[in-house]
Image: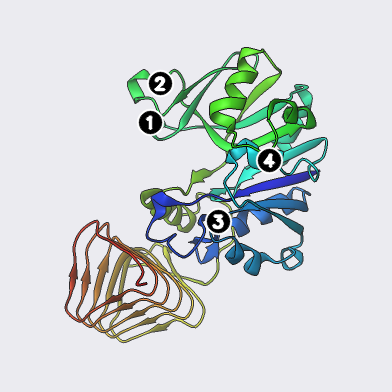
Amino acid sequence: MRAMIMAAGVGSRLMPLTAELPKPMVPVANRPVMENIIGLLAQHGITEIIANLHCHGPVIKEHFGDGTRFGVSLLYSEEKELLGTAGGVRRCEWFLGDTFVVMSGDALTDVNLTDLVEAHKRNGALATIALREMDEVEHYGVVIVGEDGLIQSFQEKPRREEALSRLVNTGIYVFEREIFDYIPEGEFYDFGRQVFPHLVRIKAPFYGHAIDRYWCDVGDIEAYRQAHRDVLEGRVDCPIEGQLLQGTLGVTNILVGERVELGRGVTLKGCVVIGPGCRIGDGAVLEDAVIWEDTVVEAKAVIRGSVIGSRCRIGRGAAVSPGAVIGSRYVVHEGTIVPENARLMPPR
């Protein structure tokens, strides 16, 4: 069996973190989130993979290469113009087999793909969507499923009181080759807006399969921060890179990457992730913060509830307020106060 990873998105909701980095390369627990997807596919015996690329595509190719280092064979479909979710898959028809899996490259999950594929085959399905029960349905595409498992209809980001279901589309699919009959070649085409509603209208064997494993769409800043909390609190089975330390409340919720230098009297509170090669100066305070690789936090700086990109410098005595997100290579000068929810783009 073969798989496709959707890795062509722009990642606008994760700005400024994605100003220089594609969404699938955004690190979660010091590993690009797409590494988890590739590892999960390999774990379930799916080692022949293709990924579509568009925004910052060379960054993905440089990191993953031909996939050998990760135990898979990895090819790429480079889209000069975005083709949409379905259009991108249609372009890879030559590679994908009779039954194949499609996954988003920016999701954190430990879904049991073997169970999903078995359910798909057991139902004799043309298409199967992995569904996850969620409370905050207003952020997702809601799927309404009949007692027989067939998908009946969809709601796009409904208000909670109007939602007809709490099952949401995870962007994890299993298809038969016949799905290509419903996707025109060489044009922008979308699964959610075009292909899936058509399958419902024609009463195709189109099924939903509820999963009970972890899934998080790492598509915006709050979800990104929540993914880190979930990893460090053991809610998802995925590898991490670095050393786990005990926090101030006796909970192991601090991850420190390789080659990190911690100065004297550094305070680490809450969920803290420090990327490899960072230097944290004397008396600095980090609370509920995610810091990417090779960033310098100078003495007595305070970072609370924030995300800091790679190769940044947070000056002596500076304060980064909750909700702030600082793009890579940004310099916060000595004594500066970065306001709450600020978005600071990388310098040009």
Specify which label sits upstream in the sequence, 1 or 3. 3
In this view, the mark in front (3 or 2): 3
How dense is the environment of label 3, judged by Cα within 10 Å: few (below 14), some, or many (20 and up)? Answer: many
Q: Residue 309: percent from the left, percent from the top? A: 39, 68
Q: Which mark is residue 163?
A: 2
Specify which label sits upstream in the sequence, 1 or 2. 1
Quarter of the image with the C terminus in it = bottom left
Please identify the quarter of the rendering in which residue 308 is found.
bottom left
Q: Residue 305: percent from the left, percent from the top? A: 29, 60
Give the spatial CA distance, label 3 vs label 2.
Answer: 30 Å
Q: Which mark is residue 24?
A: 3
Give the spatial CA distance, label 1 vs label 3.
Answer: 24 Å
Q: Quick check: marks 1 and 2 in contact, CB under 8 Å?
A: yes
Specify which label sits upstream in the sequence, 3 or 4. 3
Give the spatial CA distance, label 3 vs label 4.
Answer: 17 Å
Residue at left 79%, top 32%? 177
Q: Which mark is residue 138?
A: 1
